[in-house]
């Protein structure tokens, strides 16, 4: 939504989606989108913040120790033109903190015991964040190293079906780099894309508008070019 404008949504829906994403504790949404834009602009070349070209571990998490995030300067200013994006980004720690403590109180309310609250905190905070971070990083590392390349792109992006199952479709990474504006990353009926299914549901409910679809002819040409190469 922010990095590629693949879909649009009313302000309340945008706010809810951005707040939900912020609870993943991966940084302010505007900075995250700016980093992702830079990744596409410089993919697997000098300037890519997290490419396996500089080493597998660098692409997985080492880049965070050096580059951290691309700040939303003039190059990526369009991201923060939306006041909803600015508000959620500027209040990052509010939503991040809520995501950290909410599981404790949900566990307390459901079980009525402190033991249940601490178990909910363990799984809903610590384990959740650990798994979600490594899955996100795996798209950078595994997604640019292992799998198939059905489309002709100027980078090392790969489709990895196993990774796609656990990353809501992001594992179809070669698809994404070939057609970054597509709201659907799974481009074939057999490519599991949970994120795409959620967007279809939101569009059906008129809570989102899908801005672009991959033309069938373009899909065939990209696939044919990759086979020829």
Image: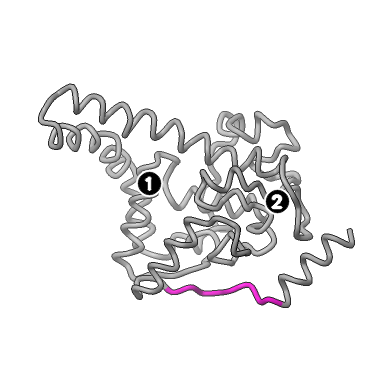
Q: Position of residue 213 (x, y in %)?
A: 58, 74
In the picture, the disc for residue 127 is none
Answer left or right for 9 relative to 42: left
Label 2 crowd (10 A; few <14 / some 14-19 / many >=20): some
* Of the image marks 2 and 1, the number of the one nearer the N terminus: 1
Q: Position of residue 77 (x, y in %)?
A: 51, 60
Magenta residues, as a range? 209-216
Q: Is residue 215 magenta?
A: yes
- Residue hosting label 2: 42
Q: Is residue 87 magenta?
A: no
164 shown above or below 224: above
Q: Position of residue 229 (x, y in %)?
A: 89, 58
Tell me what residue is drawn at x 71 percent, y 48 percent: 158
Tell me what residue is drawn at x 38 percent, y 50 percent: 89
41 shown above or below 210: above
* Residue sticking out furthest to the right: 228
200 shown above or below 32: below
* Residue sticking out furthest to the front: 190
Distance from Cα at disc 2 to Cα at disc 1: 25 Å
- Residue hosting label 1: 22
Secondary structure under badge 1? helix
Quadrant assignment, res 96: top left
Quadrant assignment, res 99: top left
Q: Nearer the viewer, residue 102 or 116?
A: 116
Q: Nearer the viewer, residue 15 or 200?
A: 200
Secondary structure under badge 2? loop
């Amino acid at each position: 939504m922010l990095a590629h404008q693949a879909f649009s949504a009313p302000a309340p829906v945008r706010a809810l989606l951005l707040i939900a994403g912020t609870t993943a504790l991966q940084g302010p949404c505007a900075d995250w989108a700016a980093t992702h834009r830079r990744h596409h602009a410089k993919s697997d070349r000098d300037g890519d913040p997290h490419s396996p070209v500089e080493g597998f571990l660098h692409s997985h998490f080492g880049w965070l120790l050096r580059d951290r995030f691309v700040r939303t300067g003039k190059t990526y200013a369009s991201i923060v033109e939306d006041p909803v994006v600015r508000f959620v980004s500027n209040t990052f720690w509010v939503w991040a903190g809520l995501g950290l403590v909410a599981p404790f109180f949900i566990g307390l309310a459901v079980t009525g015991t402190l033991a249940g609250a601490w178990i909910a905190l363990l799984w809903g905070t610590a384990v959740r964040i650990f798994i979600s971070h490594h899955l996100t990083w795996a798209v950078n590392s595994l997604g640019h190293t292992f799998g198939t390349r059905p489309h002709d792109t100027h980078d090392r992006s790969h489709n990895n079906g196993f990774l796609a199952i656990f990353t809501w479709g992001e594992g179809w990474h070669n698809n994404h780099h070939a057609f970054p504006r597509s709201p659907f990353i799974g481009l074939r009926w057999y490519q599991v894309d949970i994120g795409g299914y959620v967007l279809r549901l939101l569009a059906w409910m008129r809570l989102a508008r899908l801005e672009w679809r991959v033309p069938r002819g373009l899909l065939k040409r990209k696939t044919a070019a990759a086979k020829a190469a």
